[in-house]
Amino acid sequence: MRGARMVSALAMALFLEAILYSFSQGAEKPFYQGKTVTIFTTGSPGGGFDQYARLLAKHMPRYISGQPQIIVSPLGGSSAIIEGNLIQSAKPDGLTLLMMHNQLYLEQLKRTEGVRFDLSRLTWIGNAGTDSLGLVMRDPFETLEEVRRAKNPLNFGASVGGASYMLPALLKEALGLNFKIITGYSGGERRLALARGELDGIATSVGSAYRELRDELSTGRVQFVIQTGLPTKGGGHEPDPHISKVPLVRDMKMSPEAVALTELVLGAHLYTRPLVGPPGMPEDRTRILREAFMKALGDPNLLADAEKQRMNALPVDSATIQTFYQKLINQPPSVVKQIEKIFGPG
Amino acid sequence: MIEAMFSGLVQVFEWPTFGFMLMGIAIGYVVGLLPGLGGLPSLALMLPFTYTMEPIAAIALLLGAQAVFSTTGDVTSVLFGVPGEAASAAVILDGHAMAKKGEAGRALGAALFSSLVGAVFGALVLAASIPIVQPLVLSLGTPELFMLAVLGITFIASVSGRSVIKGIVMGGLGLLLSTVGMDPQQGVLRYTFGQPYLHSGLSLAVIAVGLFAIPELLELGVRRSSIAKPGFGKTSGALEGIKDTLRHWGLVLRCSAIGALIGILPGLGSGVGQWLAYGHAVQSSPNKERFGTGAVEGILGPGAANNSTTGGSLLLTISFGVPGGSHMALLLGAFLILGLVPGRDMLSTHLDLTFSMVWVIVIANIITVGLSLLFIDQLARITFVKSTLLIPFILLLIYLGGFATHNMIADLVAVVVFGILGTLMVWLDWPRPPLILGLVLGDLAERYFHICIARYGWTWLLRPGVIIIIILIIVALLYPLWHRRWGPAST
């Protein structure tokens, strides 16, 4: 009797064990559990791309099953082309991402030496932020009309190939403004040169200007005269709320060629913080990352952190951003020639 | 102003601010010692922790670390010949040479104590310049900055060692290497040979590690003994190094002033300041031939300058929002997160906070140097450890130092290439410092010259500031000739 009881207890235990085993087989361990995702960033540690990547690294894991660790690895101001090549050839296992430079498409368009990436093949996760770019002028230029009327060339300081060069070069071409663009200035040097009157104007983002030219803006020694604006949900553009009365570039009267050029060049400045992965990432992992990306960017804690750092968080889903960049890199040869004329050959 | 100064001091000693400062010092200490960790990524990692802190506590944490990076970076430079931080490379020349002679303790004492003097000097400059910094910085245009870069290039003659001709050739090579990458005027790629790695130019940190650390390592391997060559006897103590600092107080203060001035000027930074200070130390010494073989003045100059730069560049950062280097760019980011906007407010409404920064720099360095002096002689004994035990460790430091720059394997290749070049230079007796000086000043001189011509034509040569610096350059170049011919020694 006692032996029979023991046998039935043993059978019961085996049965339970079998059920538990089958459950454990059914509920697979999430892929990202115990894993580390690396987000490489363009620019230096502490720069804009790095800031956004760290924000995502802090808040995205909560929305990924298995809560992986996300680390940020700045590429320390190396060439944007290296970063593009790096992500193109990275292992597509869903563990390597890049907070990509938003002007990388220009290098692909111009077929710059060393380009081995193809933006249309990358796995797009989404876009995290935006910023309006504008021209800041010194006294006595308070409006774009006054800038138009300038008899002598106005000195603009810029870094070659950067946004500081791109906007005045574009406006010089599209609006026929009398600008002399002096290259070779770094960001800090430009702002000091503007403050001491060596330069008449610079191009900078509204966010940077309110951080770094606050005294000058508040006393009216410098002012914005034109801006690229922020994207609206309907696909249009609106002025940055800090400088709501400053006109938008797109509202200017331009020839159809100039309009096309403006759309192309300023396009990437609507979506300034794209996050991408290597080509051919597994679909399930891509889906997990895309969903977590959008959820994290809607998280009030992330938005509060962004607010503290004066960052314009702007969640844009992968489909929208991918279509957008696809359009940017498919340009007719005539447009590419024009790009090379203004921004130099590749 | 006096009230703000005391208020700043009291705030630093309040709890938990003081605790955060100690934490920052501890992090800065370790990071400075190990080249692979690097000050910049460490500050970036610390940044998110400051989001929820009080401004003063966050400043104590970040600035506490920043203030001691180059102080302890000098320790690695002296002991192993590997620059702990890029700003500590110049200390290797004489610091490591002293370590090889069995004088590591004295070299460390001199490096640490001159660093302390430099840091305090830089902090005092920061405090004293608050009322005049804005007009001072705005009075210096690109033409004046260009002439200062040219003045720096003339220092190549001072750091050339025995042969000025060889120095000029190496300086020229440095200038040539500074042109690698995308040119800053037209965006044309120069000497990149189809390699995207070279698009953004050569990294100073990588070159310094390769040029200085690899030859030392090879020499150690060939010699198969310890770093300190046998027969040099007992390690001399740190106290001797402190006495050296006091003995050469004039040099230490002058080099601190050079560092602080370089810090205030945008674009230069401690990478330049340390070499100009080294050049000045050589220039002002009656026994120039001792440099490179273990002259203590060769440690005191750069040791003081690389620390006084912090005060100078912080002044530029808080008064204009223009970071005087990438470390300051991160600190600027932190200030903005904390709601502190650089500009007049920092020099008026938030003056107490500005003064608390001054105090953090001073106190952090006093604590660091005080602690280090307690066990410096023990640290110096590493130079008597057998090379077979040390080489793997130093090799690790070298590769960490190279890899941490961009997190790229290509950096390790560059370390090896410059290591081979450095070894050849040592064997053939070609000086390495002029190459570094040419490299760091070449980019600045090229950019500024282009801006001068594009903006002013040739009229920039008539600016009073430019004329004064031209006269200084002529005096600096002709004085040694005059001294040789008509000076006291010639009679």
Image: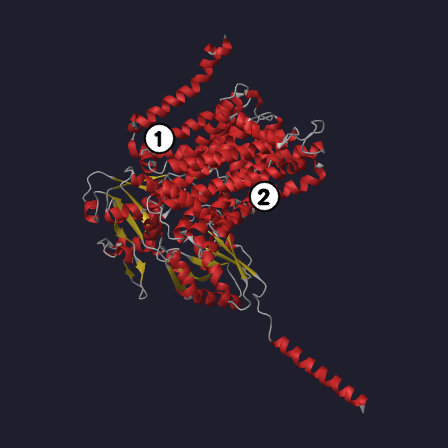
Question: Is there any visible trace of residue A161 in the rendered image?
Answer: no
Name the residue located 38 percent from the left edge and 45 percent from the top edge. Answer: B352
> x and y percent of residue B89 in the render?
54, 35
> x and y percent of residue B376 in the render?
62, 37
Q: Earlier in the sequence, mark 2 or mark 1?
A: 2
Using the rendered view, name the quadrant where residue B100 is placed. top right
> x and y percent of residue A32 in the render?
56, 65
Question: Is there any visible trace of residue A203 in the rendered image?
Answer: yes
Q: Nearer the viewer, residue B195 or A234?
A: A234
> x and y percent of residue B477 in the render?
43, 20
Judged from this view, the residue extending furthest toward the top is B491
Callout 1: 10 Å neighbours few (<14), some, many (20+)? many
Residue at image mark 2: B34
User: Residue B144 has which mark?
Assistant: 1
Residues at marks 2 and 1, common chain?
Answer: yes
Q: Nearer the viewer, residue A113 or B228?
A: B228
Q: Is residue B262 left or right of residue A21?
A: left
Subunit of label 2: B
Q: Is residue B482 above or below residue B109?
A: above
Mark 2 vs mark 1, CA separation in Å: 37 Å
Q: Nearer the viewer, mark 2 or mark 1?
A: 2
- Type of colouring: secondary structure
Q: Looking at the picture, which amino acid does disc 1 mark?
A: Glu
Q: Is residue B289 above or below residue B201?
A: above
Q: Is residue B331 left or right of residue A137?
A: right
Q: Is residue A199 left or right of residue B125?
A: left
Subunit of label 1: B
User: Residue A332 has which mark?
Assistant: none
Callout 2: 10 Å neighbours few (<14), some, many (20+)? many
Q: Nearer the viewer, residue B154 or B230?
A: B230
Q: Is residue A61 above or below residue A14?
A: above
Name the residue located 75 percent from the left edge and 84 percent from the top edge. Answer: A10
